[in-house]
Image (cartoon, rainbow, N blue to C red):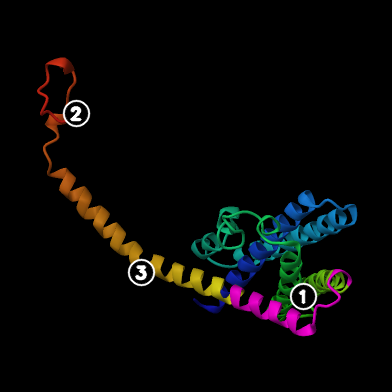
Amino acid sequence: MNDEEKNLNILLETASAEFGSALEMLAACKLSDKSNLCSGYFNHAKDEYNHAETLMSFLSKFGRKTSTKIAREYRFNTRSLIGKYLSRDGFLVETMNIKDFIAYVYTNELLAKESFEGILNLLKPNTKEGKQISLIMQDELRHHGLAKKYFLKHYPKLQPWHLKAYKLKGTISNKGRKFYFKNLRFLDKLFSPLYLLMAYFAGVTVSFLNLNEFNKKGKNLMELSPKSII
């Protein structure tokens, strides 16, 4: 993967993560039984959707500067979210208790801010795009701060090391997911030629078969031998 593809991959993966986060927050908003939490989750979802839209505009801009083949490979597709950024078991708010869910928000918003620091270096801080990324980073820190505020209010006995443990868990989870899908792509490139070769030989084999047995046009099927292949 050259530098051009790496940059497109970074923008694509981050846009996908933000879009997935928006859906998670929208699900949390829908399931919330408190108006203040519902409003907070909704505004969080709106921010994440805006972040994803901004990143996809960058992706489109950089994609136009590369070959059609490469641009097509790094095109945003919502189907790629399932399994990678959204669990097949349901939304996180449905599968986690509220404490772990807020911990997820707390850690992932901080990790997201760190990811945007890399994108900022890619786009350069003084450019128009760089300034937009800086605003997104402020949003991520604000989301992180709101989650931390919730923790301090509802779980006053929570120690700083608990939050560090949550962050470590989130970091390991993110890296593990990226490692898995990176190797999945490698294996796909490795085995795709083999699958095509097998399909070719299967096609050649079929071309030598006598298919007259399958031609039943104009014949009474009731008179066919029970041993006949239909």
Mark 2 → mark 3, Cα distance in angstroms? 38 Å
Where residue 59 sits in the image (x, y, percent)?
65, 64
Q: Which mark is residue 77?
A: none
Can residue 88 be spotted in the picture? yes
- Amino acid tagged 1: Gly
Quarter of image, res 9: bottom right
Say which of 213 and 28 sits in front.
28
- Identify the secondary structure beneath mark 3: helix
Quarter of image, res 47: bottom right
> Could you tell me if the residues under marks 1 and 3 are in contact, i.e. CB atoms within 8 Å?
no
The crowd level at tag 1 (other Cα within 10 Å; few <14, some 14-19, many 20+) is: some
Where residue 82 sits in the image (x, y, percent)?
57, 56
Span shown in magenta: 153-173
Badge nearest the viewer, 2 or 3: 2
- Amino acid tagged 3: Leu
**Left/right of residue 121 with respect to residue 13 in the rendered view:** right
- Identify the secondary structure beneath mark 2: loop
Q: Earlier in the sequence, mark 1 or mark 2?
A: 1
Pointer 2: what residue? 230
**Left/right of residue 72 with respect to residue 96 in the rendered view:** left
Pointer 1: what residue? 130
Badge nearest the viewer, 1 or 2: 2
> Could you tell me if the residues under marks 1 and 2 are in contact, i.e. CB atoms within 8 Å?
no
Extreme residue toward the front, this view: 157
Say which of 224 and 120 sits in front.
224
Pointer 3: what residue? 190
